[in-house]
Amino acid sequence: MIVRDITSAIQEFAPLPIQESWDNSGLIIGSPDQEVKGVLVGFDCTPELVDEAIACGADMIVTHHPLIYGGIKTIAPEDPVGLAVIKAVSAGIAVYAAHTTADKVIGGVSGIMARRLGLKDVEVLDQEADGIGFGAVGNLPGPMGAEEFIGYVKSCFDLSLVRCSKPLDIPVSRVAMCGGSGSSLIGKAMEAGAQAYICGDITYHRFFTPKNFMVIDIGHFEGEVEICDVLFSLLRKKFPTFAVRTSEKLRASNPVFYY
């Protein structure tokens, strides 16, 4: 098995050409012709994830977030990104990311969120050519009061708290969502007829919403982390006898702590 075999399988699901121009999905460290004996799937390529790959004998890491987003001027062990790069290169570990590529396919991040909520008639929220694009929108199995819906969201995503705008005085029946930082699609959610929009990283002023519309911030990590299970499953299905595993510390790797 070589790196190219793994990346080709991922790109059947999340094609590399659809990534955003600012993104850095794809092979970040290593050669496509590099031999691979094991793959570790994680959310962010942290120094700790590289250590876990070394410990379990994986020589390739697949994550959602890219290790390197843009140009870097220095690679130093004092910086988490620099340390991860140093560790991966020193150990001969290839690093691949499926970021906006996995965000823009309906079976990816936002589609997973829609399935968790049990939505019907799910469509891409901000649709581009060929049916791809950011976000998803669909209908609940039945209308819910606002507070009931907030509790439902917490239950579906196994959350102890969420941030939301003023609860509605009308039932929620249509819901839009986008994994990660999705504030830019609030307008699209309203245009799609949603009463509620779910994403992460919503800033203060975005919580001032129009009548009959509300936003819910479930957290960046919380909305996207399940993509790791999808990446693991597609690789395991494609290569059933190959050593593929998900990080044992995946659910604890959220860099945001709540008290």
Image (spheres, rainbow, N blue to C red):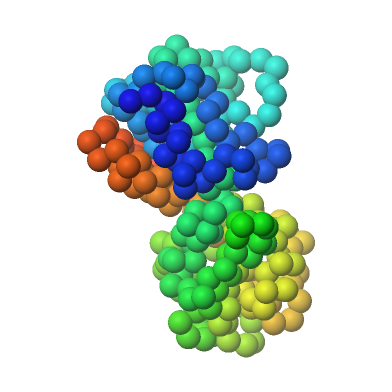
Q: Point out residue 246 in the picture as x, y percentages from the top left corner.
A: 34, 39
**Quarter of image, res 133:** bottom right
Question: Left or right: 6 with respect to 111?
Answer: left
Q: Is residue 153 above or below residue 230?
A: below
Q: Point out residue 105 in the picture as x, y percentages from the top left corner.
A: 54, 54
Q: Residue at x 55, y 33 (%)?
A: 26
Q: Point out residue 196 in the picture as x, y percentages from the top left corner.
A: 62, 73
Q: Residue at x 67, y 43 (%)?
A: 20
Can residue 259 be seen here? The reply is no
**Quarter of image, res 78:** top right
Question: Left or right: 53 with respect to 179?
Answer: left
* Relative depth, front residue between 179 and 250: 179
Q: Point out residue 155 in the picture as x, y percentages from the top left corner.
A: 42, 68
Q: Is residue 126 above or below residue 96?
A: below
> Number of callouts in the render?
0
Q: Residue furthest left?
A: 241
* Relative depth, front residue between 237 and 248: 237
Q: Is residue 90 above or below residue 206?
A: above
Q: Is residue 228 above or below residue 50?
A: below
Q: Residue at x 32, y 42 (%)?
A: 238
